Amino acid sequence: MQEAKWVHEIDLPVKVVTGSGALAKLPEVLEVLGSYRTLALLTGPTVGPVVGKRVESSLSSYGFEVHTHTITASDAEAVSEAESFVREVGAQLVVAVGGGKVIDVAKYVAHQLGLRFVSVPTAVSHDGIASPAISLKDVNGYPVSKFAKPPLAVVADTDVIAQAPHRLLASGFGDIIGKITSVRDAILAKKIKGEYVGDYSLALARMSAAMVAGHAEAIAKHEPEGVSALVEAAISCGVAMAIAGSSRPCSGSEHNFSHALDLVYPDKKSLHGEQVGVGTIMMAYLHGLNWRRVQRLLQTVGAPTNCEELGIPPEAIIRALLVAHRVRNRYTILGEGGLSETAAWRLARVTQVIP
Ligand SMILES: [Zn+2]
């Protein structure tokens, strides 16, 4: 018998529950997942007293032993605190109830301790709610990218997510709109570098961007269909990464720009998805795509489209553009040599990112 050329192994969430009132299903979801009884519930300072408490009491009433820890930052110190907590309480499973930061930290801590985690997003500020990709900063502010298992389950209550601050949802929209260029970068890497990337994962990533683009106005108003589209698109992105076995379909030059910005301007107040959105405008221009449409979509949702709205000085945007090609070993439209300084200024000005 001939040996199979490709052995493709895919880890996916066992259960995804989304929609209005989904949170009430969490105890039942955990019961069917197996013999997890001792849980570490990681939550955030704002959401903890409201949603975290609610989850804690409903899980306790089902007989789960729940230990709650509040994560206040996503820096190395907060991560190691959360890790010690989860280890000390002898948790068998990590349950993350919170926004992007909480999910990121919980995913990393679970991975470090060889545990699985359940994702209960209270906002969609990035595409990580269902993904196996871990993105954090080390003590020096350098991006740490790891690939773990995806969450064992995702319980995304759209009623809860609709209550999240608008800025978070607009940021999630920007991160997902970024798939317009990340998919193009993956295709380019396939053509130029012969890199393998499955068409199915690219189709899923592309579809996620199309879904949120089609619901931009509903997302802007936190209408139920808009919030559902955002949640489902983020879940699709997670599945795309799980299928690809890397963040490749969902993270290209627009993400390189965002990571570069984190490095060159660490004092920034802008969110990951906001930076990715602005990066997508510029990378769409480089790819010869309709960058004005990207700009318009971001404006519709109320996400930043220029340096002023990001709160970042023009010089930092340029510095980020100049080093973006080498923040990660990933081929994109930025090539191996990156942009020249003249080209970087021109790109940022033409796309109205810099006045
Ligand atoms: Zn992202």
Image (cartoon, rainbow, N blue to C red):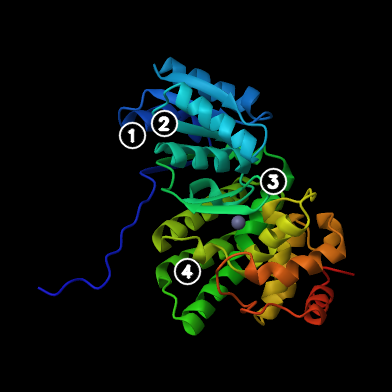
Vertical placement of 247 versus 75: above or below?
Answer: below
Question: Which residue lies under the disc numbered 3?
Answer: 168
Q: Are marks 1 and 2 in contact (CB under 8 Å)?
A: yes
Does the residue at mark 4 contact the one at mark 3 (Cβ under 8 Å)? no
Mark sitting earlier along the chain (3/1): 1
Instruction: Name the amino acid, label 1.
Output: Leu
- Of the numbered discs 4 and 1, the one sitting upstream in the chain is 1
Of the two numbered discs 2 and 3 in the rendering, the one whose residue sits closer to the viewer: 2
Pointer 3: residues within 10 angstroms few (<14), some, or many (20+)? Answer: many
At 44% across and 56% down in the image, what residue appears? 239
Q: How much space separates mark 4 and mark 1, taking CA atoms? A: 29 Å
Work out whether residue 113 or residue 274 is closer to the camera in this orientation and state it: 113
Q: Which residue corresponds to mark 1? A: 33
Give the image quarter of residue 341: bottom right
Please name the amino acid that badge 4 sits on.
Leu
- Foreground mark, 2 or 4, reads 2
